[in-house]
């Protein structure tokens, strides 16, 4: 700092604010190594960029801090206001505001371990989403044919599981989905194997397992990606991770939790000795049932034999009954024919009594009478109409203009056929036609005279 001040005074240079902040930042970042700082988080902000901005404080002071997205994505817990943490950071200066700040590279909870805190936070989150809900858990198949095992193919867990399965039920098919169960990439590898088994649908139940260890050793089974792969798996999943006292997120999400890998193998397999005993008891029960049924059937057959009539005797009885029925049928048939013959004779007599011949003769005679009367009436009516027609003809002749013409009169008509009644209707020189009693005349008007001049 002293050399910087002397240099500025000696040169007489005047710094801009930006230059000054840049120089101070260079001095700060070059003067302090990476260091651990402990304090309480406050003023935590999470902008859309994905960076974290917060203050770290104790009872007497506070300092601004930033943790960029590339580093906070590696956090195994969710920072919150009021949380006591330790950050591994470098000292710096934010030139834009001239603020002293710490750039965090790592962050861990102070006091309670980071892994335990991350475990509790993820457990709370998934529980709120319903991944631990008992209503969605699947029942294990009673007699699975094939079991899938997601674990390390070189670990103790696979040896324990296979040993239990060989002892309890050697006929069970086993498919191993090998995966690392410890390390930074183990969680994603375990999730991929679970999703692969779910996609292939080649096993009836799936064991996700590994041997015991510390919380850090078992951490792959506490990762969210594994929990969601187990939740989305359509095959029933048994989690057998660690020892009986160990609990992981996978245990809460799985359909069934087994305290150990060996216990998981026992849960999904039937004990062949117990099955043999059960089958033997069923066999004895079935033999007793069959034997009892045979005895009951034998008694039934014996009872039917005592009640059974000899077929020859039965045929004789049926033959005799057939003869009786034949005689009754013939008698009934003959009686029916005789009754119908008597009824037919009675109907014929009644028909003869009601024959229509007489009525037809009477109607023919009546028709002849009506014919004579109709002819007489028509003749009379015709004579009457003829007389009336003659009288009408004579009357018509009396008023007919033809009769007038026969007495020497004529009818004058113009060319248009109009009858001339007065002299005023024609002019001198008009051509007229005079219709006579017999024939007609063509005339020309030479002179017209009115009634006074006639």
Image (spheres, grey):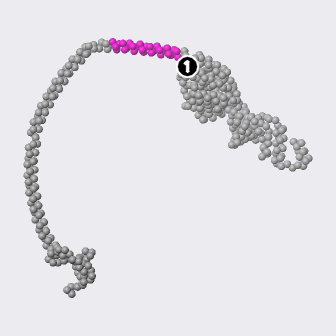
**Looking at the figure, which quarter contains the N terminus?**
top right
Which residue is label 1 attached to?
270
The image quarter containing residue 202 is top right
Relative image position of residue 10 (x, y in whole percent) = 91, 47
The answer to whether residue 417 is left or right of residue 50 is left
Please report the bounds of the magenta region as a residue range.
275-302
113, above or below 369, in the image: above
For the point 62% across and 17% down, the residue is: 163
Relative image position of residue 409 (x, y in whole percent) = 17, 78
396, above or below 202, in the image: below
328, above or below 12, in the image: above
For the point 11% across and 67% down, the residue is: 390
Outermost residue, bottom side: 453
Relative image position of residue 443 (x, y in whole percent) = 23, 79
The image quarter containing residue 136 is top right
The image quarter containing residue 381 is bottom left
Outermost residue, right side: 10
Q: Is residue 1 magenta?
A: no
The answer to whether residue 405 is left or right of residue 21 is left
Is residue 83 something one can see in this rendering?
Answer: no
> Which secondary structure lies at badge 1?
loop
Total number of numbered discs in the rendering: 1
């Amino acid at each position: 700092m002293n050399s910087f001040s002397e240099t500025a005074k000696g040169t007489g240079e005047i710094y801009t604010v930006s230059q000054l902040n840049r120089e101070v930042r260079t001095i700060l970042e070059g003067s302090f190594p990476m260091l651990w700082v402990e304090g309480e988080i406050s003023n935590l902000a999470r902008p859309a960029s994905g960076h974290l901005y917060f203050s770290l404080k104790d009872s007497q002071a506070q300092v601004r801090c930033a943790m960029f997205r590339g580093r906070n994505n590696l956090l195994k817990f969710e920072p919150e206001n009021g949380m006591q943490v330790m950050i591994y950071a470098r000292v710096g200066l934010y030139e834009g505001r001239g603020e002293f700040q710490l750039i965090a590279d790592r962050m861990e909870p102070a006091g309670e371990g980071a892994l335990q805190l991350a475990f509790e936070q993820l457990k709370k989150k998934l529980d709120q989403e319903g991944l631990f809900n008992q209503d969605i858990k699947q029942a294990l198949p009673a007699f699975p044919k094939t079991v899938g095992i997601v674990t390390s193919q070189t670990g103790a867990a696979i040896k324990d599981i296979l040993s239990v399965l060989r002892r309890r039920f050697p006929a069970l098919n086993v498919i191993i989905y090998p995966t690392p169960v410890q390390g930074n990439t183990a969680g994603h590898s375990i999730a991929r194997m679970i999703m692969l088994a779910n996609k292939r649908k080649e096993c009836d139940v799936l064991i996700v397992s590994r041997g015991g260890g510390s919380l850090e050793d078992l951490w792959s089974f506490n990762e969210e990606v594994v929990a969601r792969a187990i939740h989305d798996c359509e095959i029933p999943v048994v989690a057998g991770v660690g020892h009986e006292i160990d609990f992981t997120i996978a245990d809460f999400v799985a359909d069934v939790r087994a305290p150990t890998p060996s216990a998981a193998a026992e849960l999904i397999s039937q004990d062949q000795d117990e099955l043999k005993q059960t089958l033997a008891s069923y066999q004895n029960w079935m033999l007793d049932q069959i034997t009892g049924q045979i005895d009951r059937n034998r008694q039934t057959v014996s009872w039917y034999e005592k009640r059974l009539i000899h077929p020859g005797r039965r045929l004789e009885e049926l033959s005799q009954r057939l003869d009786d029925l034949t005689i009754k049928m013939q008698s009934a048939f003959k009686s029916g024919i005789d009754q119908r013959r008597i009824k037919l004779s009675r109907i014929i007599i009644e028909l003869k009594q009601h024959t229509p011949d007489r009525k037809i003769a009477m109607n023919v005679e009546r028709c002849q009478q009506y014919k004579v009367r109709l002819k007489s009436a028509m003749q009379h009516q015709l004579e009457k109409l003829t007389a009336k027609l003659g009288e009408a003809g004579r009357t018509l002749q009396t008023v007919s203009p033809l009769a007038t013409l026969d007495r020497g009169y004529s009818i004058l008509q113009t060319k248009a056929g109009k009858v001339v009644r007065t002299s005023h209707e024609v002019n001198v020189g008009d051509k007229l036609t005079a219709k006579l009693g017999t024939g007609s005349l063509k005339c020309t008007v030479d002179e017209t005279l009115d009634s006074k001049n006639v």
